[in-house]
Amino acid sequence: MIGVSTPPPIRVGVLFSETGVTALVERTQRRAVELALEELNTSGGVLGRPLQAVIHDPASDPRRYRQLAEDLLETDGIEVIFGCYMSSTRKAVLPVVERRGGLLFYPTLYEGFEFSPNCIYSGAAPNQNSVSLARFLMQHYGQRFYLVGSNYVFPYESNRVIRDYISSHGGKVLEERYIPLNASDEEIGQIIADIRKCDPSVIISTVVGDGTTLLYRAYRKAGFDPDKMPIGSLTTCEPEVAQMGSEAAEGHYTSAPYFQSIRSKENARFVDAYQRRFGPDQPISSCTEAAYFQVHLFARAAERAGSTAIDKIKQALPGCEFPAPQGPVRVDQENNHTYLWPRIGRVGSDGRFTIEEESSVPVKPDPYMITPEDENWGSPSARNGGAGIVRLTGSRG
C-alpha cells in the first residue's frame, strides 16, 4: 500500500522578544501568534497545509531584529514574518523584508507617516488612538499638558501629533521630556519633580517597557491624584498594569482599540482560549490581540488567493474580514493599515479597564493625517455610514 504523502508545512517567521526591556508585552504577542497558528492547524491548516513557526528572540535590540530577519528570509527561505514591537525594530526589519520581497505583519500601535508595500500594519495609527486620547483628556481635565516618553522614534512622533492637536484646540504643552529605555529610579524621580513644578492638568505617557512601572509607582508615591491630574497613555495596557499593580495604575487612562474587558462572544472565546493555553492570570493587551488577528487575516488571504505567493496574498488581503475580539477588522487597500475600533479605558481598583468611550464603527486608518481631526475618531460618521462615539454608562461627562 502506497502511503499518502503529507503536504509540506507553510513556514512563517516570528520575531518577538522573550528578553530585554520590552519583553513584557512582546512575550504576549508571541503567544498570541502561537495560539492563532494552533487554531488554524486544528482546523486543517491553510490550503490543506499545516503552519509551522520559526521563532527567534531578538532581545529588544534593533540590530538583532535585522540580523534575524535576514536569517529568516535569506537563509531559511521564509517569506512571511509576524513581529516587531518598537518602531525602531520595525524600521530595522523593513529594509530586509523589502529587499527580499517578503511580507511583515506588524501588530503594534505606532506613530504613522509610513507606508511599505511589504508591511501590513494591524496596530493603531494616530487617528485611531492619539487624537481621541488628547480630545478626551482636554474635555474632562483641562488644557495644561505634560508629555513624557521613551527616547526613540515612536514617542517623539506620537507626541508631535498630540502636541499639534493640543495647541490647535486651545491647550498648552508645558514640557516634553524623554527618558532612556532602561530608565533608572533617579531619572524617573527627575521627571516627577519636574511634573510637580509644572503642575499640569494631565500627563501623557508614551513610555514603554519597564520604565512604565517605575513612572506610575513614582507618581503614586509622590502623592499625585489621578482624579485631578491623571496619566493618559497609548502604551500602558494590561501587561503593564499587572506588573505595576492596581494600586499604582488605578484612575489612569489608556487609548486603544482593544481591552481585555470587552464584552462580546468573540472576546470571551479569545480570552478563554488564551488563558487556558498560557495561564489563567495572563494579561492580554491590544498588542496581543492584534498579533492574534493578523495571523487569521493572513490565513484568510491565502485561502482567498489560493496561494501563499506574497503578491497574491497582498492582493487578497483587503477583501478579507475577520471577527476579531475588538470587532470585525479588515485591511485598507489604500495604505495597508487596518480598520480598528478605538476606545478609551480607565483602570479600576481591580486592575481592569472600564471602557469610558468607544467608537460604534470601525475607523478607517489615516496614517498620514496632517491636521488632527476633532470629529468622532477621525469622522467615522462621515466615513462609515452615520455612527460615531459612544459614551458608556458610568463614563465621565
Image: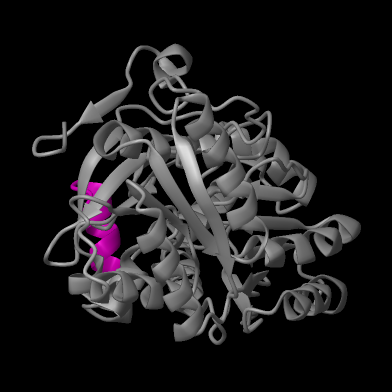
Residue 267: in magenta span: yes
Residue 114 spot, x, y in % from top left: 72, 43
The residue sitting at 58% across, 56% down in the picture is 155
Look at the image and tell me whether residue 156 can be seen: yes
The residue sitting at 87% across, 73% down in the picture is 74
The answer to which quarter of the image holds residue 312 is: top right
Quarter occupied by the C terminus:
top left
The answer to which quarter of the image holds residue 112 is: top right
The residue sitting at 61% across, 43% down in the picture is 160
- Depth check: give the residue in front, 234 or 366: 234
Q: In this rendering, would 236 be left or right of 33?
A: left
The answer to which quarter of the image holds residue 56 is: bottom right
Residue 48: in magenta span: no
**Secondary structure of the magenta portion, mostly?**
helix
- Depth check: give the residue in front, 51 or 108: 108
Please, is residue 30 above or below residue 237 in the view?
Answer: below
Q: In this rendering, would 341 be left or right of 130?
A: left
